[in-house]
Image (tube, coloured by chain):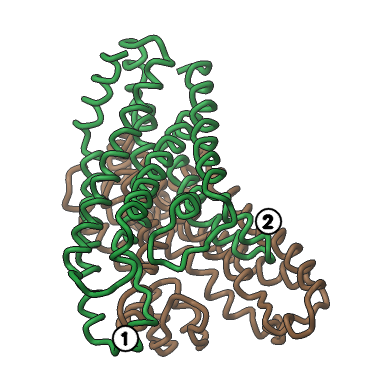
């Protein structure tokens, strides 16, 4: 197949994504996480006003700023799952394979469309959480908000890419498992349950394995330590960035290989 | 009514997803025992002073964390999988009295989850206790009555979650939507409540389904004290959640077009 065919496959997948209801539900939920973060920001700002000077130095805004991107990861991960499992459920996948017989190209097209939408949504929520909470708290000088916005933005932009990684993992899981329920539960396991279980491993393994969990990679890419988190910080920035890319690519490559070999 | 229960029981035990859910419960039960073995091993290497400071999670902790996820999946698939395939129309043709069908499904799914949860909790706890033997770990050697009450309420909470999810599934009719919103409620909402300023963080968290069993019967030997509700209030709240979800689900199932 030539480049034209791949472009057509991307156009077709974009059309599908745009015309199903679930996409809008998922994106609404993603936007809601940003709204919730901002609402909580208002509440936190009010609470800050009532604190003594000593308590204020211990009060952090950063956990709230990071929560939006974390929740968005689940939302767009479901978007990735729903890019393929409903086609298996309805049997439409056979029509899709007939129209685009090269399965690797098909999966790449789905990945391109879902990944792009997830990247935009993830960045919007993550960067929006940073900028939005800064605006909401106004000139209250939180101890952990001393750095300028320009200084913080690169780190949050990297963190904003992790939801897209979850979306691609969701797509790969959907292609492998072909079941909506199975894929979503596996995704939730990778997104939340596994990091929690790893955190409870005996030392030093909790720190070692915690360093390679997806949620801990943005901080390591930015060179921050893992204080106050369930992750580790043993990787250098370059290795962490490579690992984050591998989390996006390797499951998809595996899914493409299986898809090519397997019956529809 | 008995035929409806029999039919639903037949459905539940013949589909693969049920085996996957209960298989996962069994795996986590075995992991409870493995965890207990590790704790015992760890304990042996501690000095007396360290031992008095150590608070190991009780052996059923792993199940208490993972049972809710299994309960959500079972509760969702009980109804939404029929909507996915269109099989619910056949079910309604065979059993046109919708409330009876709805009740039978709820009874079978809730009952199966309760039985599986209690069996796995009891086996996981007793297995873990046997593995640590006579090492003086307070979370492993609580009074029998308090331990039984704790395990019973963790199991009841799992069954309650199955029923709540089942009611939500009757409204949403979509596997993806039901599982995602319920897991969001279980995982994302608690984190958000923790960000509220004190004392509202504790108050809001105490109302969440996953916080209820610990407030009704905390695990013996833990420092406990999580949550602000008295035990009877938490128990009533759990029943109210189930009643509301089932009522809304039943209304939606009975009144809406198939």
Q: Tell me the SS state at disc 2.
A: helix
Q: Nearer the viewer, residue B106 or A61?
A: B106
**Chain that is green in the image:** B
x 45%, y 18%: residue: B258
Mark 2 lies on residue: A35
Residue B89 vertical position relative to residue A73 in the rendered view, above or below: above
Mark 2 closeness class: few <14, some 14–19, many ≥20 residues within 10 Å? some
Query: Is residue B153 at least partly visible in the picture?
Result: yes
Instruction: Reply above or below: B47 against A36.
Output: below
The chain holding disc 2 is A
Residues packed near mark 1 inside 10 Å, few (<14), some (14 to 19) or many (20 plus): few
Q: Which residue is mark 1?
A: A204
Residue B63, x across and y down, in percent: 31, 56
* On screen, residue B221 above or below A13: below
Indicate whether A204 appears above or below A36.
below
Residue at 81%, 72% in the rendered image: A50
Residue A175, given in percent of the width and then of the height, sits at 30, 51
The chain containing the residue under callout 1 comes to A
Query: What's the distance in space between the residues labelled 2 and 1, CA to CA?
Result: 38 Å
Query: Is A36 or B244 nearer to us in this picture?
Result: B244
What's the residue at 35%, 89% (across, down)?
B49
């Amino acid at each position: 197949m030539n480049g034209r065919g791949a472009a057509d496959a991307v156009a077709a997948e974009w059309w599908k994504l745009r015309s199903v209801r679930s996409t809008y539900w998922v994106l609404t939920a993603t936007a809601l996480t940003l709204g919730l973060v901002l609402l909580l920001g208002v509440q936190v700002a009010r609470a800050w006003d009532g604190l003594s000077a000593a308590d204020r130095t211990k009060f952090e805004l950063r956990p709230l700023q990071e929560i939006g991107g974390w929740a968005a990861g689940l939302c767009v991960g479901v978007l990735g799952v729903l890019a393929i499992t409903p086609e298996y459920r309805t049997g439409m996948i056979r029509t899709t394979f007939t129209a685009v017989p090269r399965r690797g190209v098909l999966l790449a097209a789905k990945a391109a469309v879902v990944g792009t939408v997830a990247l935009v949504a993830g960045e919007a929520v993550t960067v929006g959480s940073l900028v939005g909470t800064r605006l909401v708290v106004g000139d209250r000088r939180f101890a952990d908000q001393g750095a300028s916005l320009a200084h913080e933005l690169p780190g949050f932009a990297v963190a904003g890419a992790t939801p897209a990684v979850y979306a691609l993992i969701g797509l790969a899981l959907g292609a492998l498992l072909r079941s909506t329920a199975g894929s979503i539960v596996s995704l939730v396991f990778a997104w939340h349950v596994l990091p929690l279980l790893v955190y409870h491993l005996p030392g030093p393994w909790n720190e070692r394995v915690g360093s390679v969990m997806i949620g801990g990679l943005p901080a390591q890419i930015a060179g921050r330590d893992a204080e106050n988190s369930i992750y580790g910080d043993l990787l250098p920035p370059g290795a962490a960035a490579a690992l984050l890319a591998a989390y996006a690519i390797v499951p998809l490559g595996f899914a493409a290989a299986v898809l090519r070999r397997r019956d529809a | 009514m008995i035929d409806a229960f029999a039919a639903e029981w037949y459905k539940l035990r013949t589909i693969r997803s049920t085996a996957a859910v209960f298989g996962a419960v069994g795996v986590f039960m075995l992991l409870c025992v493995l965890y207990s073995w590790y704790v015992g091993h760890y304990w042996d290497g501690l000095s007396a002073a360290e031992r008095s400071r150590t608070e190991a999670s009780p052996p059923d902790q792993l199940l208490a964390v993972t049972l809710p996820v299994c309960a959500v999946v079972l509760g969702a698939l009980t109804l939404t999988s029929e909507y996915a395939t269109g099989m619910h129309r056949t079910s309604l043709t065979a059993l046109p009295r919708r409330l009876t069908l709805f009740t039978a499904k709820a009874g079978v799914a809730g009952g199966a989850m309760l039985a599986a949860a209690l069996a796995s909790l009891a086996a996981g706890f007793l297995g873990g206790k046997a593995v640590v033997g006579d090492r003086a770990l307070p979370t492993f050697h609580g009074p029998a009555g308090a331990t039984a009450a704790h395990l019973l309420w963790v199991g009841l909470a799992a069954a309650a979650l199955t029923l709540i999810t089942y009611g939500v599934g009757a409204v949403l009719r979509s596997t993806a939507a039901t599982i995602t919103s319920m897991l969001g409620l279980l995982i994302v909402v608690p984190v958000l409540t923790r960000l509220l300023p004190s004392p509202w963080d504790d108050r809001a968290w105490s109302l969440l389904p996953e916080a209820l069993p610990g407030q009704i019967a905390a695990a013996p030997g833990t420092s406990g004290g999580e949550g602000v509700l008295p035990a009877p209030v938490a128990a009533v709240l759990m029943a109210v959640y189930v009643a509301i979800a089932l009522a809304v689900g039943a209304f939606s199932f009975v009144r809406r077009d198939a």
